[in-house]
Image (cartoon, rainbow, N blue to C red):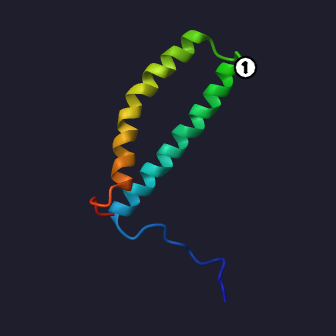
């Protein structure tokens, strides 16, 4: 029988916890990007605000590339 009150463990070690946290952060960034793009398309933010955001997003992009490579690289232990 399935116990709905039982706690579910999402990870069993630190590596899995860090990978899960990185994926959660990436998801949050993607959602924020979507909202900002919608705001720009609807003229809710100015072009200058969009350029400033793009500049900061470009610097974060390199960090995300590393995170994605580590999450998908079979040589990196999970």
> What residue does disc 1 label?
42
Which quarter of the figure is the N terminus placed in? bottom right
Which residue sits furthest right?
42
Residue 64: x and y in percent read 40, 40
Please state the total of marks drawn on the protein image.
1
Residue at the image position 48 percent from the left and 67 percent from the top: 10
Residue 40: x and y in percent read 65, 20
Left/right of residue 23 with respect to residue 50 in the rendered view: left
Q: Residues within 10 Å of mark 1 (few under 14, many from 20)?
A: few
Q: Is residue 72 above or below residue 56?
A: below
Q: Quadrant of residue 78?
A: bottom left
Left/right of residue 76 with respect to residue 50 in the rendered view: left
Left/right of residue 9 with respect to residue 16 in the rendered view: right
Left/right of residue 37 with respect to residue 62 in the rendered view: right
Residue at the image position 64 percent from the left and 77 percent from the top: 5
Q: Nearer the viewer, residue 26 or 2?
A: 26
Q: Is residue 4 above or below residue 66?
A: below
Residue 62: x and y in percent read 36, 34
Q: Is residue 13 above or below residue 64?
A: below
Which residue sits furthest bottom?
1
Residue 20: x and y in percent read 44, 57
Residue at the image position 64 percent from the left and 31 percent from the top: 35
Kind of element beneath mark 1 = loop
Residue at the image position 72 percent from the left and 20 percent from the top: 42
């Amino acid at each position: 029988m399935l116990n709905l009150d039982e706690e579910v463990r999402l990870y069993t070690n630190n590596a899995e916890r860090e990978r899960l946290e990185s994926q959660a952060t990436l998801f949050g960034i993607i959602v924020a990007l979507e909202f900002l793009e919608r705001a720009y398309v609807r003229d809710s933010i100015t072009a200058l605000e969009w350029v400033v955001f793009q500049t900061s997003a470009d610097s974060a992009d390199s960090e995300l590339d590393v995170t994605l490579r580590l999450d998908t690289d079979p040589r990196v232990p999970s």
